[in-house]
Amino acid sequence: MNKMPLLIILITVSQFLNSQSIDGAWEKYKTNYEGSNERHIAIFSNGFNSSTVYNSVNGKFISTDGGSWYFKDNLLTQKIEFDSKNPERVGLTTNSEIKLNENKMTIIRTGETWTKIDDGSPGKLNGAWLMSGRIRDGVKSIRNIDRPRKTMKILSGTRFQWIAYNTTTKQFMGTGGGTYKTIDGKYIEQIEFFSRDNSRVGAKLGFEYKLDDGEWNHMGFSSKGDSLHEIWIQRK
């Protein structure tokens, strides 16, 4: 019996299902009312998301929002955990009807269309992670990840973003992001936006990483040259 047609069908179905998934990173470009070119990046990863706007030329940060999400029957439901521009939205649940067609995602209400730029691969840290502790001088200290004050890092297969915020006070503290790679135990970031210091845009930072019993150990040196060993736990 010739099994080749079945194999082709399985590959085709797999590609179709993957193309219809919202998981991964998306982008769109827009010219604002001032004439500046904006790049919009959205990351959807394991039930959590971020959406960020920054100047596509100089990387100047404009705004970010995100939280958790659920997608079913073309309806995207999102619960807002942070919003740098409109903090009063924190805690709200929003619903958007969307249409997925190959690598395009269209928001029905507004007509805006996003293009998928990765499907959650190839990076090995895909997911949403919470800062859960540090190791200093060989001593491990753990923080409560259920508290309102959070530092979250969300990654697709090629994109990363960290966000510091408080779900109770609705305060936004800062964010930064860009692209990343994981190669032979090395985690390498290329910064495309940084809300606290735009001069950091373009910087390339290298760290060591290790996944150990559900913990992401992030090791290297800070921008000030200080040794660091952070521990991150993936959100569920």
Image (cartoon, helix red, strand yellow):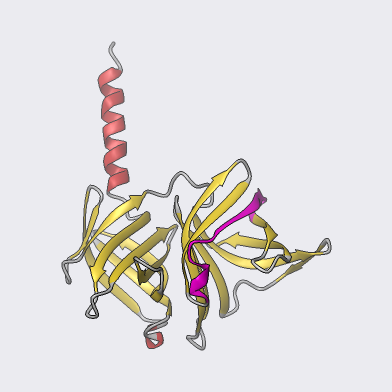
Q: Is residue 140 left or right of residue 224?
A: right
Which residue corresponds to the image point at 69% horizontal and 61% vertical from the top-left? 221
Residue 30 percent coordinates (x, y): 24, 68
Say which of 188 and 162 sits in front: 188
Q: Quadrant of the N terminus?
A: top left
Q: Is residue 207 magenta?
A: yes
Q: Which residues are magenta?
A: 197-215
Residue at left offset 30%, top offset 30% = 10
Task: Specify the quadrant of the image occupied by residue 115.
Answer: bottom left
**In the rendering, at what x and y percent does residue 25 appear?**
37, 56
Residue at the (53%, 64%) spot, across then down:
153
Res. 26 visible in picture: yes
Report the label total: 0
234 vs 122, nearest the viewer: 122
Query: Is residue 29 or residue 1 the one in the foreground?
Result: 29
Please say whether residue 203 is one of the residues in the magenta stretch.
Answer: yes
Give the residue displayed 63% in from the left and 55% down from the top: 216
